[in-house]
Amino acid sequence: MTIHHGTLSYLDPERPEPWASFIEQIDRVAPHLGSLAQWVETLKRPKRVLIVDVPIVRDDGSIAHYEGYRVQHNLSRGPGKGGVRFHPGVSLNEVMALAGWMTVKNAALGLPYGGAKGGVRIDPRAFSRAELERITRRYTSEIGIVIGPDKDIPAPDIGTDQQTMAWMMDTYSVNVGHTASGVVTGKPIALGGSLGRHEATGRGVYIAAREAGIRSGIPIAGARVVVQGFGNVGGIAARIFRENGAKIIALQDAESTIANPAGIDIPAALAHAAAHGSLAGFFGAEPLGDDDFWQLECEYFVPAALEGQVTPQRAQAMRTRIIVEGANGPTTPAADDILHERDILVIPDVLANAGGVTVSYFEWVQDFSSFFWSEEEINARLESIMMKAFEAIWQTAQERKVSIRTAAFIIACQRVLAAREQRGLYP
Ligand code: GLU
């Protein structure tokens, strides 16, 4: 019998390195941090990294091993917080960067968390539901020594969903001997999940775009929008953009790229993707080449897939006014410079996609108090936190004459490093 194990990330040949992008972003903010800059090295090293072996029995009876991670990048302001990714491209380098971006995101929004992230290096589509449950449970058990409601709280990310969180919550609870609903967020409502959490990231992307549009004189109503990624972030953002009068002229998912200058029928595209697993074969639009996709003339471009997508070459070719980063780390630092020169406004991931973790915070608070809020209340609080963060970051960008990304990093890194300084070093 041939046994197929997962590949090991440190043998991965030529993957772009997201951690290098994160370090570059930290280097760019350091000159703006005043005396706190003496602590900046803190952010260039993850506090704690855990690599775990995830062995399972496959449905055919064979034994297979996969590589899993949980990285706690920083815990100065509170417990770790950040999602768990199941994707074949997951590597220690990627999870470190994603954890770093969570530190910055949580601090930029003022959420009382540090930053963390996890992942398992698998293609979830290649496994049965029962195998995925075994992978999830074994992974959760292995990282059980570092997670917990007041230690580090995972959530969904690419390749994981409510069901994954239900298995994680159950596994952790069984291991500690009592129901600990606050150990993960993004759970099903019946297990202590929050209303509005499923839509929150996409809704936050829309709020960030709307606020950017108001300040730049580019209204959403009537705008042409291009979206890369059609999952929980891109799909929901596209729907809300359309509900607010925008025209989604092109979409790309892992399998296909489609365009319709008259505007794609998003509810129909969502129904197609739900039924077939991707946009492939959707009739309401024409197929489009990848290069053409990146060069479409539009007002808003929403990269909502993986990191490293907006490369310098694409940044040179793009014909959009505003980029709203639904994904984490979609723009490389070199591409950022080109966009800045070309006067294309970038609303960075640490602000634009923070709606998800903001409602995760609400879920965690509701679990602790066992008192659940209405969806109206959740959406109103999400609006208020996002708008306050947006305004503060926008103001900082104007005052310091820096990009929105650098402004978000200034505010966030000041908060993290002030906490670091006030706590002091032990011993
Ligand atoms: N995975 C999401 C993110 O990248 C959500 C994290 C969370 O809710 O903890 O922000």
Image (cartoon, grey):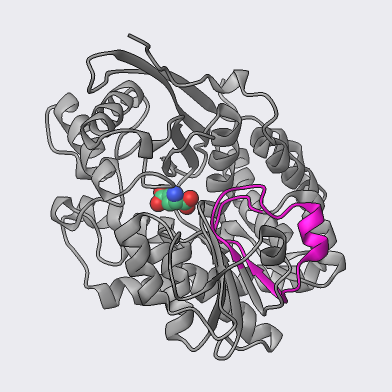
Q: Is residue 370 left or right of residue 405?
A: left
Q: Nearer the viewer, residue 262 or 403?
A: 262
Q: In this view, does 400 lie to the left or right of 327?
A: right
Query: Which quadrant, please, contains the C terminus?
Result: top right
Residue 156 in the image: state x and y as whole percent: 37, 47
Q: In this view, does 298 lie above or below 357?
A: below
Magenta residues span 302-330
Is residue 156 inside the magenta stretch?
Answer: no
Q: How many labels does the image show?
A: 0
The one nearer the camera, 309 or 386, is 309
Hey, which quadrant is residue 425 in on the image? top right
Q: Give the quarter of the image for residue 338.
A: bottom right
Please tell me whether the stretch drawn in magenta is mainly helix, strand or loop. Answer: loop
Q: Residue at x 67, y 80 (%)?
A: 299
Q: In which quarter of the image is the N terminus?
A: top left
Instruction: Return the x and y of residue 39 as percentages of the image width and height.
Output: 70, 37
Residue at (42% x, 59% y) in the render: 356
